Amino acid sequence: MAFDVTSGLTLFDKLWSAHEIVRRDDGEALLFVDRHYVHEGSFHAFDQIARRGAAVAHPELTFGVADHYVPTRGSRATIANPEIARMVRQLDDNTAKHGIRLFGLSDPRQGIVHVVGPEQGLTLPGLLIVCGDSHTSTHGALGAYAFGIGASEVAHVLATQTIWQRKPKRMRVTVDGKLGSGIAAKDMALAIIARIGADGATGHAIEYAGSAVRGLSIEGRLTLCNLSIEAGARLGLVAPDETTFAYLKGRPFAPVGEAFARAVEDWSALRSDDDASFDAEVSLAAADIAPIVTWGTSPEDALPIDGRVPDPAREPNEARAQYLREALDYMGIAPGARLTDIAVDRVFIGSCTNSRIEDLRAAAAVLAGRTSKVAGLVSAGSSLVKQQAEQEGLDAIFRDAGLEWAESGCSMCVGINGDLVASGERCASTTNRNFRGRQGPGARTHLMSPAMVAAAAVTGHLADVRPLLAGRKP
Amino acid sequence: MDKFVRLTAAACPIDIINLNTDQLLPARFLKRPRAEGIGDALLRDLRFDSAGHEVADFPLNRPAWRDAKIIVGARNFGCGSSREAAVYALVDYGIRCVIAPSFGDIFSGNAVQNGLLTAIVTDAEAADISAMLAHAPDLPLTVDLETQTILCGNHTYAFIVDPVRRAKLINGLDDIGLTETYRDRIATFAAEDRIRRPWAIPGGVP
Ligand code: SF4
């Protein structure tokens, strides 16, 4: 029996106990790690184990992906910027030295780590997955216990294949009903963050439940779980179901044949028991969720597109008023402005939040036969997604609209490969962080769904995508 | 790792809600090897303007707080990216303790690995301490991890810290060394787990 079947347990409890090696009296437990993903930023951890002279305990459970620093434009064979070339080479060297499989720059399976893991079938239900990246929460969409860790912890996992954790509290976020047309998982996630705040789930493992969550595709669930960290949560989870099993069947690293059937049998126990209780419960009605955009410098600064940004003068709490003033000032938006009056300078479609094939299709559905009023970049989540999009002719739609069709990587989500939003420029973006300077020093970021970014491109300002979809195939 | 037991030092209030790790250490400095030191990049885009000049009224630039070893922050300090280099930047700058009402989970985990204490007080207490410091910038704070108290002038505040993290800081313990003492139990677990969850091994392609 792979997972507990006693009653009263949450999905998270079952995942936790399947990985617990030792629990100390002080409450910390040593957990076994099933998959460890590393990227260029993991160099601090490799340096740490080199200093100790430690070996990698389980290279066969460790996978490298080049994503954060890779160029998305121009030649990838020879990287012009020597610092960036060094970052990519360090990952090549470290993975080669320790016998770790790498999806490097020249591998056709390369892409953003949180896109590649699920796509390759490396991410499976019931696994404990870590990576030195906060958006590791993404992988919970398949029913995996997945969370981001820091460099010292990466070194610890490399050396021991285990990690010390204190059990987080459990929160259930239930979204029931049906999302309106043109409304995506991104809108659901931003609505949740706006409701509970950027630290609303600190110290918690979130399980997403309810008919609207069940109704999401795996791509949608990946977007939803990806943004868990922006609500402060350690991780996000969706119980695996037929949608999950169908997605995984035939993926390169997934079990095959009998082994797959056996796995599905075990995975089917991965759900919260009917009598399970949670430390916190939040519920939303899907029908109430409108297309959402952020206006400020935290993902919690999110509002339905038909709204206005707050006016600090009307805010009774002085600390809050001060926060609003600073956010609006940085964003260059007048107090109380209508969101749809905010003009954008460029758009970006990409990142581990929204760069899967379904995201690209949703944006293309709006852009087809139209022209973007502003410059923009589209970077597919993986080289395989890029290939598929090209087979479907989506690249032509983006190009014809005037957007740039780029190679896969983290790109303009964090800008460390050189894809930057200029200081003072405003970008409608499918990414996950609208922090000050996230897309480059002085850059102004508005987060929204791929379809909403396409709507901003076509109109030149933040806009409701729904009228633009009228009469088009969903 | 450096031990942390008791510290008396200048404390700098930085009253910014959701002060994320992208602010603590902007991404363009992430390429730097640790050996070069990262302290100068701490809060770079808040401490300096785009022309590279110091922002005179940013707290850490004020004469009394330049050499602060303690920061008094606001809600959700260190949220966002898991970059441990944000902690390196604080530590390399000389900060040994951050006091705030709440912290990003990954940030506080990273902090303890580098001997940086994250002390939790209430919103009101953080505001109180910040107000006192604004009034008397030279007032040193004493943070005592053994008694879990902060002494500020003649006020004493209790703070919360995870007991395991507290023990690690006081003893300067290193996790990898500790875990290696469990080597046999890890091996037994892994062997039994292969039978319990055969599908957990990456399959398919060679
Ligand atoms: S796409 Fe952005 S959020 Fe995702 S892993 Fe890359 S840098 Fe991090």
Image (cartoon, coloured by chain):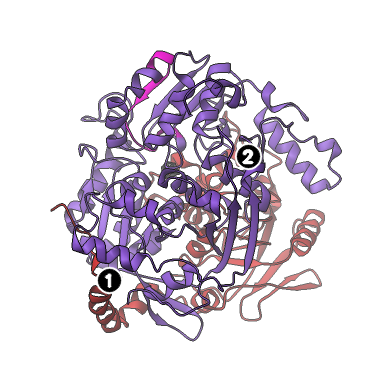
What residue type is disc 2 on?
Thr
Q: Give the range drawn in magenta.
A: A398-412
Q: Is residue A308 above or below residue A396?
A: below
Q: Where is residue A1 in the image (x, y as percent from the top left)?
A: 32, 77
Q: Position of residue A108 (x, y in %)?
A: 21, 37
Secondary structure found at label 1: loop
Question: The chain shown in purple is which?
Answer: A
Question: The chain shown in red is which?
Answer: B
- Of the pair A386 and A166, the residue shown nearer to us: A386
Q: Residues within 10 Å of mark 2 (few under 14, many from 20)?
A: many
At 55% from the left and 76% from the top, the residue drawn is B166
Left-right relation of B21 to A382: right
Q: Mark 2 points at which residue?
A: A297
Q: Residue A407 magenta-drawn?
A: yes
Picture quarter containing residue A146? bottom left
Q: Residue A157 magenta-drawn?
A: no
Q: Mark 1 points at which residue?
A: B197
At 52% from the left and 31% from the top, the residue drawn is A429
At 46% from the left and 75% from the top, the residue drawn is B172
